[in-house]
Amino acid sequence: MGAGLRFPVMTSLPTSHPDTAPLAPLVTRTVALSPADGTALLSLLPATSPHDTTSWVRRGEGLVGWGRAASVTAHGESRFALLESWWQSVAASAVVRDEVDLPGTGPVAFGAISYAADSPSGATLVVPSVVIGRRGDQWWVTTTTTPDALPPTVDPVVHDDVEAPGEVAFADGSLSPAEWAGAVAEAVTRIQRGDLDKVVLARDLDVRTAAPVDVRWLLSRLAESYESTWVFAVDGLVGATPEMLVRREKGLVTSRVLAGTIRRTGDDDHDLALAASLARSSKDLEEHEYAVRSVADALAPHCSSMNVPEAPFVLHLSNVMHLATDVAGVLTDATSSLALAASLHPSAAVCGTPTPVADALISELEHMDRGRYAGPVGWMDTSGDGEWGIALRSGAISAEDPQRMSLYAGCGIVAGSVPEAEVAESDAKLIPMRDALTATRP
């Protein structure tokens, strides 16, 4: 399993022809794998292009992949439907041998979808040439090729050639902190006069590194520091999200909603007091209620036996604490995980309420293209099962220059928001990616 292996790559399909399948069917085989005891899933990733490395890992379990057996990119309002149609065509024509038969085995597509329909970033599905998965004590490897190519032989080799990006320089993105605080103040004014209830405003940071960014470096550092998040990489988008937009597995649909945040101090007693204050904060509880309601309303047409807890719990992460609610339901139709994600996007947790008014205000005040930040990111198998998070605590590596990145963070703004406090909260949310970039080898 060396960096010298080459895998077939299929050209992305024209987005105007969603019913066009790849030129040849995919041939996929999944077999059990037995790596050495103590092997970390992320350590099995070889060196490859940042845009051909894929990851969806939490607490050492999940999926990693590399290479590109097939891919498609779509734009516009119909981008979700285009991806769904393409994947159905791929799945229908694929030749599959699956000796493990778990969610995430067989053909798997990783996806990253733009927040806005008009974003040049678009929405991409990638079928890696190799995927290694782990669930509990079960490991597997999936290889995907075309009929005229032999599948690669994959050994679970630990790669220790990961290098730090060297010196890192950060610069203001579209708005300086002071300018962004002004945007927050304007949003509060609009909310207080009754134009809308909530809006989520994001800001960006420009990053330059001395050496090309190795996605594996970022993934490993993020996984070490934020083990309760989903550490992801798809098509150059990389991050660690605490928010599960939707999971579909064997008929059960779940979603974790986060809204309402407070920064940790590192003092356990003080943080417990802060957590209690967060749980009582009318501003944060109001923001959280909007987000939970938007998710429950979107899932209700597809689910029965919906469980929506009356009160949130406090989720403790390394740098911040969030109000969190887990929503669950039983799927009553054949809607795929990707289609469920489409029905949920954009939720109040990343846009606001009412959605059309909040979305218009985002376009007016942010002065940037979010790209795939705050859009769905995750994976799906041919049964429609999969996991889609919200691309938070993340950055996008430039396709033209691997020594450039954009980092993103956002905050929910309601009537009681204070601009200076929101700047501090956004700084806290940028810490995971900033620290991962500047970390030294342990």
Image: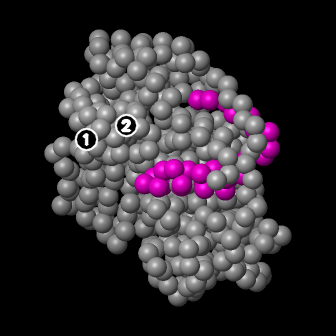
Q: Are marks 1 and 2 in contact (CB under 8 Å)?
A: no
Q: Secondary structure at mark 2?
A: loop
Residue 441: give its label: none
x, y percentage for residue 320?
Answer: 41, 38
Mark 2 surroundings within 10 Å by alpha-carbon count, few (fewer than 14), some (14 through 19), many (20 or more): few
Residue 19 can be seen in this image: no
Q: Is residue 69 left or right of residue 102?
A: right
Tag 1 residue: 293
Picture layout, residue 143 above or below residue 256: below
Q: Amino acid at mark 2?
A: Asp
x, y percentage for residue 15?
Answer: 63, 52
x, y percentage for residue 200?
Answer: 42, 29
Q: Quadrant of the N terminus?
A: bottom right
Tell me where the magenta segment starts and ends, as one range: 204-230
- Circle nearer the viewer, 1 or 2: 2
Residue depicted at x 78% and y 46%: 212
Tag 2 residue: 267
